[in-house]
Amino acid sequence: MKGNGDFSIGNDVWPGISKLIEECGEVMQVAGKLIGSHGDPAHFDGSNLGSNLKARLESELGDLMAAITFVSDKCGLDADVIVRRTNEKRDLFLKWHGRGDEEETSL
C-alpha cells in the first residue's frame, strides 16, 4: 500500500509513521471500550470481531506491533535499543503490578 505523502508506507520521509499513529489510535479505541464496559470483553463494537473486545485488542496489538517493527526497520532505528528499552519498561510494569501500586520509578 502506497501512502499519499511523507510519513506514509512507500515514501522516503519516515515511512510508516502515519500508519504507526493510526494503529496506536485503534489500540486506544479498544482500550477505551474495555474501560467503558468495566472490563467486560463481551461488548459489541461494530467490528468484524463482533462482541469480543479481547479478540479485537489482540488483533489491534498485533497490528501495532507490525507497525512498530516496520517503522523500526524502514527508518533505520536500532532494534537492540528498542528491545532493551522494552524489557526495562516491562520489568518496571511487572514490579508495579507485584507491589499493587504505581509508585513512579524513573527509567
Image (spheres, rainbow, N blue to C red):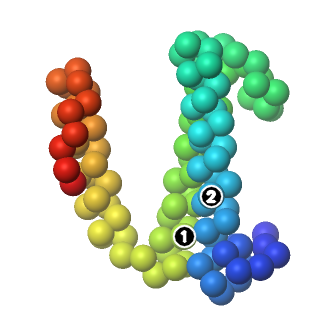
Q: Quadrant of the N terminus?
A: bottom right
Q: Secondary structure at mark 2?
A: helix
Instruction: For residue 91, say whether it is visible.
Output: yes
Residue sitting at x 65%, y 86%? 12
The image quadrant of residue 16 is bottom right
Residue 67: x and y, percent?
58, 60
Q: Is residue 80 above or below residue 54?
A: below
Mark found first going from the N terminus, 2 or 1:
2
Task: Answer left or right for 82 relative to 57.
Answer: left
Task: Kindly report which numbered mark, 2 or 1, lies closer to the viewer in this rendering.
Answer: 2
The image quadrant of residue 27 is top right
Residue sitting at x 23%, y 21%? 100
Kind of residue at badge 2:
Ile
Instruction: Specify the label residue 21 is tagged with.
Output: 2
Residue 72: x and y, percent?
48, 71
Residue 7: x and y, percent?
67, 75
Q: Is residue 25 above or below residue 19?
A: above
Residue sitting at x 50%, y 64%? 69
Q: Which residue is mark 1?
A: 71
Q: Quadrant of the C terminus?
A: bottom left
